[in-house]
Image: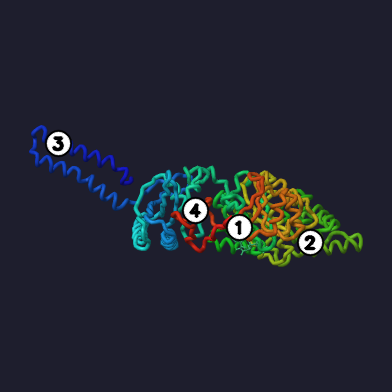
Amino acid sequence: MSLIDSVPLVLRFTLVAAALSLLSYALGVVKLEYSLALAVLSITPLVVFIIKGRLRFPSLRIPVSTSYNGLGSVSFRILEVEVKARRDSVASGIAKVVSDRASRGDIRYVLLSVMEGDLRRSLIILTSRDAGRLSVEAEVLKSLLSSLVEDIRVYDVNIPELAPLASWALEARVHSKGLILVSESTLSSRHPFKGGSNDGSTRIYLGEVLDKPYPKPFALEGRDLEGHIGVFGSTGSGKSTTLSVLAERAWYQARIPVLLLDWTGEHSSLLKARGLSFKEYNPATGEAAINPLDLSKDIDYLVSVMVKALSLSPPQAYMLLRALEQGKPRNLRELEAVVEILSEESKWDREVKRALLRKIGMLTRGSYDAFKETRGVALEGICVIRLDYVRNVLARKSYALFTLAGLFMERASGVEGPKVMIVLDEAHNVFSGEEVAFIEQLFSESRKYGLIFAIATQSPSSIPNSVLLNTNTKIVHALRSARDKNVIAETMSLTRDYIDILDKLGPGEAIVQSPSNPEPLLVQIQLVNEPGDELHQPLVQGKPVNPNPGIPDIKSS
Ligand SMILES: Nc1ncnc2c1ncn2[C@@H]1O[C@H](COP(=O)(O)OP(=O)(O)OP(=O)(O)O)[C@@H](O)[C@H]1O
Ligand SMILES: [Mg+2]
C-alpha cells in the first residue's frame, strides 16, 4: 500500500482526535490548555505525514497483470524533472547522468516525456525486482542530478497508471544498456504495456517511415504475419540485419517461434551481438538431423524434394524412383546400396547410376550425421540451425530443403503446431535451380499450416517467380542490378519515384509494402526496439540528444 493510499486514514484520525479534544472542552471535561495540547498532539501524525511525503515516497510494490508473462511483482519509482531554465546543456546533462546510471546494473530506466494540457512533463521511471536496490538507486540518481545538472529540480511523483509501463520496461529487450526512451505517442492503445492487453502482441516494429513530413513508426501487423516476407537488396544493403531484426521481434514482440536456417553462421553472431538468448543446433553432429527417407510415404513427393535438393536430371530422378519403389530403403546408406544393385540395361543406365550415386554420396560422406536419423527441433523461442557446419555446399542445401520439406509434411499430415517464422537468408542458395514444383508448393501452401517464411536474397530475379509473388510483404533495400530492379518494380507496381531511388537507398533503408500497407513506403529499419515516433527525442524540450552513443541517431527525412 502506498503512502498516498493512507491519506484518508491519517486525515480521519486527525479529525476524530481534534473533534474529541474540542468536544471534551465544550462539555467542560478538560481545561482549555489540555484541550489545545490534545488537538496539537492529534494533528502531529498529519504533519509528519506531509513532511515525510515531501521528503521521500516509498517504492511501490504493485501486482502485475498476468499478461506480462508471470513477471511477478515489480517495484518502481517515478521521478519528475522540473527544468527551470531551458538550455541544451540541461537536456544533455540529464540524459548523460541517466544513461550512465542505466548502464551499470539491473535497474531499468525509462525516460518518458508526456504532455498534460500545455505542459510537457519529463519523467524518469526506475524499475527493478529488487525494491531495496531501487530505493537506494533513486536517491543516488536524485542527488547526482541535483549536483551535476544546474537549473533543475527532481522530485518523486506517484502515478500508479504507469505500473504496466514499468513492468513492460523490465521485460523489454533493449540494446541501450537498460535505458528506454519513450514518448507519449508510444503510449498508444496498441502497445502491450498500455492497459496490459494483448491486442498489440502480433505487431512487429520495423522502423520509421521516412517519406512523410514526420518520422512515423512502421510495424508489420497481424495480417502481414499471416503471409511470407521477402527481403531483397544488393550486397551490403542491410538484408541480413533486417532478417535478424525480424527474427528477434517475431519472438520477443509477437511471440512467434523462429526457426532460423543460418547459411553462413552470420545470424548466430548477429543475435549474440544483440545479447539475445536462442537455441543453436549443429546438424553436423546430428542435432536437428533429418533423414530424408522419413519425409513422406508418398514416393513422388520424396522424389520431387530430392530432385530439387540434389539437382537430379530426369533419368537420375527416374532411377531414384525405381530404387525407392523396389528396395524400400529406410535411410540414405540403404538407398545407396539399393541403387548400387539396380539392374543396368545399357551403358547409359550405368552412367546415370554412377551420377546418382555420386550425388547421394555427397550426403552420406562427410555430413552423414545430418541425414542419419530424424531428430526434431523444439519450436520455442529462437532456434538457429547452423547450416555452415555442414561443409559440403550441396549437402548444406539438401539439408535445408529436407528440413523445410519435413516441417511442411508434418503439418500437411495433420500434426498441429504453433505458427512458426522460418528465416532463410541467401535464399537463392536453397531455392534457385531448375526444379521448382516442390518450392512452389512449399511457398503457396505452407501459410495455411502456420509456416511463415522470411527470406532474403540479393538476387530476386534468381528465385522462382512464384516465390517472389508469394511474399506478401516485401522489404526492398538498395538494388543495383537493372534486372533485379525491373523484377521488383514490376511485382510491387512501383511508381517512377520509387524506381528511381531503388539504387540510392542507404544501409537499412527500404521500400516496404505489406498487406496492411499496400502503398509502398520508404522505411528506415531501426535496430532499436522500442516503437515510437519520437524514439530518440530528448527527455526535456530542446535539441534532440542521443544520450547513448550505442543508439544510432534518427534519420532525418
Ligand atoms: N537498419 C540498419 N541501420 C543501420 N545500419 C545498418 C542497418 N542495416 C544494415 N546496416 C549496416 O549495413 C551493413 C551491411 O548490412 P548487412 O550485412 O545486413 O547487409 P546484407 O545486405 O546482408 O549484405 P550481404 O549481401 O553482404 O550479406 C552492416 O555494416 C550493417 O551494420
Ligand atoms: Mg547478408
Percent across and percent down for residue 17 are 18, 39
Question: In the visual, does 112 lie left or right of 463?
Answer: left
Residue where numbered disc 1 is placed:
244
Whether 128 is drawn above or below 164: the answer is below
Give the spatial CA distance, label 1 vs label 3: 73 Å
**Image quadrant in which the N terminus is located:** top left
Residue where numbered disc 4 is placed:
172
Percent across and percent down for residue 285 are 64, 64
Q: Which residue is drawn at 48% across and 59% down?
A: 545
Residue 431 shows in this picture: no
Residue where numbered disc 3 is placed:
22
Question: In the visual, does 25 lie left or right of 281?
Answer: left
Q: Which amino acid does label 4 sit on?
A: Ala
Residue where numbered disc 2 is placed:
337
| Colour scheme shown | rainbow
Observer-nearest of 143 and 277: 143
Give the spatial CA distance, label 3 vs label 2: 107 Å
